[in-house]
Image: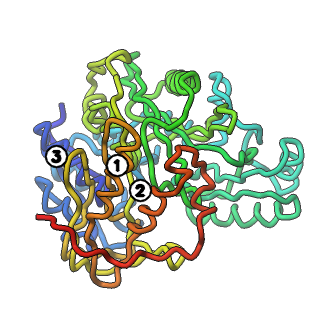
Amino acid sequence: MFSTVLIANRGEIALRVARTCREMGIRSVAVYSTADRESAVVRFADEAVHIGPPPARSSYLNMPAIIEAARTTGAEAIHPGYGFLSEDPDFAEICEANGITFIGPPPHVMQRLGDKSDARAVMAAAGLPVLPGSDGALGSPTEAAEIAARVGYPVILKAVAGGGGRGMSVVRDPDELAWAYQDTRARARAVFGDERLYLERYIDGARHVEVQVLCDGRGGAVHLGERDCSAQRRHQKLVEESPAPNLPAETREAMCAAALRGATAVGYVGAGTFEFVVTPANRFHLLEINCRIQVEHPVTEMVTGVDIVREQLTIAAGAPLTFGQDDVVPRGVAIECRVNAEDPARAFAPTPGRLAEFVPPGGPCVRIDTHAYAGWTVGPDYDSLLAKAIVWAPDRERAIARAERALGEFRVAGGGVHTTLGFLRRLLAHPRFRAGEHTTDLVDTMTSDVTEPAPAEPASVP
C-alpha cells in the first residue's frame, strides 16, 4: 500500500479522500490555490502545498505544479477526485512518466472512453445498446441534419469531449438544428478545447440510471448496483438515490450485467460509472462512461457498505478485489441531495460570500459530506457545491422523510449566500418524486418562480 497520496482536487471530495487515507494509515497531501488557503482539507491533511492563484487553469489544472508537489512531498500516488484532471489521459501519462501512480484507469482506457463518440462504437461492439445516432464525430451541420432526419426528432447534440452535463443541446425542430450545431460547437470549444460533436436520438420522459463498477485489472470485476439520477436541471444532477425506484428486476439485472461486460471489454481498472437512459418502456441505452469517482458515490456506499475510495486505493496499489459479486448485498434506500450556494429565484445564479453561520444536520443515518464551515468564504472561482446530504433508511418512504428532516435542519446564513435547500425540499415533496415516477424533465416542469421559503425558527441543534 502507498505511504503517501497527494489529492489533486479541492472541496468536499478532497476532504473525503483524505479521511479514507487517514483511516488506512496513509499520509495525505493536499494541494490548494490561494483562494483555498483556509480550506478544510488544508487543515485536515498531513501536509499541504500551495500550487497557484485562484483560477483553476493556474492551480488545480496546473499539471507541472501538481507533479512537483507530489515529487517534493514523496507522494507515490495521486488521487484526482472528480472534475479537473480526473479524466485527463495526458495527466495520467505524465504521472506514469514520473513514477507516480495515477489512481484511476490506464491512460489508454481513458483515451478510448473519453471520446464519447468512439466510446459509443466500442460499447456497441461489446453488445451494449446505444441510442440511434452518428457513428462518429459530425463533419458538418448538413451531416447532422441528414442523421437527425433518419433517426427522428427530437435529437441531442453532444460534445465528443463533454462531461458533467455540459456541452449538450436538445433540438426538436429541424429549423433549429443548424443554429444549435454552431452554438453547441462553440461552447464545446470554449469549455473542453474540442469542438467536435456527435448526435443521438433524444428520449422524452426518460430516466437517468447509472451503474457503479469496480475492476482490479486482474480479472476481478463487480458492480455495486445502480443509482437513479433523474432529478436534474439542465443535465446537472440534483438528487440521486439507490436503488432506482420502480425499476423492474430484469431491467436492473440486464443493465448491471451490460456495465460489467463493457468494463471487461476495454480492460477497465478502478472505479467507473456506466450511465444509461431508461425509456418509459424500461428499455435502456448507454449514455456515457465516467472514468472517475462520481459526486453521488456516497449513496452506493450507504446501501452496500463498500468504501469506494478505499477500493480505488487498494486497486491502484496492485491488490485484487477482496470480495466477489455474491458478497455485494444492497440494503435499504439511500438518497443524496446536493446543496449548492445558488439562488433558485434568480435562475440558480451562484451566490458567493462569507458564511456567518453553517450548521449541518445530524441524527441517525445522516451523512454530510462538506468542506464548508462558519467563517469560510464561498468564492466565485469554483463549483458552487456546499455540501451533500446523504441519508439511509430501510425503505424509500422513510428515506425521503429523513432527507426532508435533514435539509430542514441545515442552518446556512451570511454574506449574501443563498442556497438550494428550499428548492430541494420542494423537489422531494413533489408527487412524481414521491411516487418514484419522476423523469429527467421533472425539474423543468416545476414552476419557474421558485423562491426560498422563509427561514424557520432555528432547530435545537447542539
Q: Secondary structure at mark 1?
A: loop
Q: State the residue in front, 236 or 119.
A: 236
Identify the amino acid type marked 2. Answer: Phe
Q: Is residue 413 left or right of residue 20?
A: right
Q: Mark 1 near mark 2, Cβ–Cβ under 8 Å?
A: yes
Identify the amino acid type marked 3. Answer: Gly
Q: How many marks?
A: 3
- Residue beneath label 1, please? 81
Assign the C terminus to one quadrant of the image. Answer: bottom left
Q: CA distance from mark 1 to mark 2?
A: 8 Å
Give the residue displayed 43% in from the left and 34% down from the top: 212
Q: Secondary structure at mark 2?
A: loop
Q: Say whether disc 2 or disc 3 marks the residue closer to the N-terminus.
A: 3
Give the residue displayed 40% in from the left and 47% down from the top: 296
Tell me where residue 91 appears, x and y as whole percent.
Answer: 41, 48
Identify the amino acid type marked 1. Answer: Gly
Tell me where residue 339 appears, x and y as whole percent.
Answer: 37, 63
Q: State the residue in front, 416 or 435.
A: 435
Q: Is residue 146 left or right of residue 455?
A: right
- Packing grade of label 1 (10 A; few <14, some 14-19, many >=20) is many
Quarter assignment of residue 460: bottom left
Q: CA distance from mark 1 to mark 3?
A: 19 Å
Tell me where residue 159 appears, x and y as whole percent.
Answer: 64, 53
Give the residue displayed 46% in from the left and 57% down from the top: 429
- The correct choice, above or below, for 144 with respect to 334 in the image is below
Q: Secondary structure at mark 3?
A: loop
Q: Say whether disc 1 or disc 3 marks the residue closer to the N-terminus.
A: 3
- Residue beneath label 3, please? 74
- Packing grade of label 2 (10 A; few <14, some 14-19, many >=20) is some
Quarter assignment of residue 255: top right
- Residue beneath label 2, please? 84
